[in-house]
Amino acid sequence: MNYFNESLTSVHSKLVNGDFSSKEITQQTLANIKSVDGDINAFLTVAEKDAVADADQIDQKGIDKDNPLSGIPVAIKDNMLTKGLKTTAASKILENFTPMFDATAVEKLKQLGTVTLGKTNMDEFAMGGSTENSAFKITHNPWDTTKVPGGSSGGSAAAVASGEVLAALGSDTGGSIRQPASFNGVVGMKPTYGRVSRWGLIAFGSSLDQIGPITRNVEDNATLLNAIAGHDKHDLTSSIKEVPDFTSALNKGVKGMRIGIPTEFMSQGLDDDVKQTVLDTAEQFKKLGATVEEVSLPHTKYGVAAYYIISSSEASSNLQRFDGIRYGRRAADVKNLEDLYVKSRSEGFGDEVKRRIMLGTFSLSAGFYDAYFKKAAQVRTLMNNDFAKVFKDFDLILAPTAPTPAYGIGEDVSDPMTMYMNDVLTLPVNLAGLPGMSIPAGFSNGLPVGVQLIGRPYDELTVYQAGNAFEQNTDFNKQTPKMGGTN
């Protein structure tokens, strides 16, 4: 199965027509992973026997002709619980953890007849932007295996980009779907906060985390979001708003749309090729009938500082549960309870996770709460107000997804501040809880460059509409890497 020439629609049509069965396509996909993933390292766990068995059961029931996901194999980021399938969050502290239930997003996919192929690599507990912080392996970019795939959903993005799978789920706390989508030349959507249930997603920053789809094209992405969106009684932060059919506006074009480009996102520090890609994208939207103007989001310059205080504080609270007692790694040869806590966490957590726990604990401490966490929360409100002001007059915001194309493995991992600044363009969207999607829009020295489309709260429909219009009039999403591809 050559996924570079397929989409969810085309594969589903062939399943309905009997060109192949779900079991056959699953076996072909597993064979593809075996042949390609040795060089990519996108997967931490491959559920070979279970995937084939599940596909066989789907075939026995029959492919649902009205359900575009029926019989389709997918990959899941390893911070989403999967019943009976090891879930580690790429951390030694959960190295042998097997959940007893599925995350809601995973369960919804299974109910629609998808086949879970396995769990993809990530930065430990989703803390990082390169997938170099995984405790188990480093994932490589299919376009150039000396480059990072981005993170933290680098495994999911690389699996799609290399043609190993057609679709995957990732999670986005500060850009962790969109940035790897940009680095890998695929489509990645971070939905509005609350659009998709977080039940069963191993928490990093509870007010920021959001599950979303990664695919090769916009229509597939919208189809996958249709499947996982909606209110969940297990997650009180999930929205009760009605979920539209995200594919319904795909072919309506952008004529009459008003699109803003934030001045602050196009300033110093942006790679020249990335900047030119955004400007070229703006010209394409103008040709398609949209109006594109500069706008201002003045408080986004404080975004990195506010984000890392808020997210680290929430991580400090969320990761308290990993104490060596209830589940996960338990240190041996301990003398007392405190010794158990210290040794289990020291052995189980990597350096980046420890760094953020300490930063968050400091920010929440009695003497510093007002100076740091409270101030960051106030800045977050100012940023939200900036976005709301722009969206009174504009339908969408167009911006670069990342300041640069993919950088070299080992290049930034030893410099936390440089790594943090790589999120400067994506994390404002998480702080404001908005939908944002990265789409392929250009190349720089053979590496993909993505741009992000940012929409009003719960207006993923317009984001998909514009993304699809751009995609239909360009061929960037049709380009494939040499690794697993044909170019």
Image: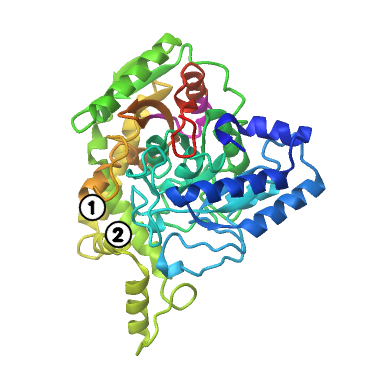
**Residue at 26% across, 51% down:** 410
**Residue at 60% across, 48% down:** 31
Q: Is residue 120 above or below residue 150?
A: below
Image spot of residue 401 (x, y percent): 35, 33
Is 285 included in the stretch rendered in magenta?
A: no
Range of residues picked out in magenta: 450-464
Considering the numbered disc 1 on the image, is that residue within a helix, a strand or a loop?
Answer: helix
In the foreground, 307 or 54: 54
Amino acid type of the residue tagged 2 in the rendering: Glu
Image spot of residue 485 (x, y percent): 49, 35
The answer to whether one can see residue 191 in this image is: no
**Residue at 36% across, 30% down:** 449
Image spot of residue 323 (x, y percent): 41, 74
Q: What residue is pinned by disc 2?
A: 352
The answer to whether one can see residue 360 in this image is: yes
Left or right of 273, for residue 150: right
Q: What residue is pinned by disc 1?
A: 416
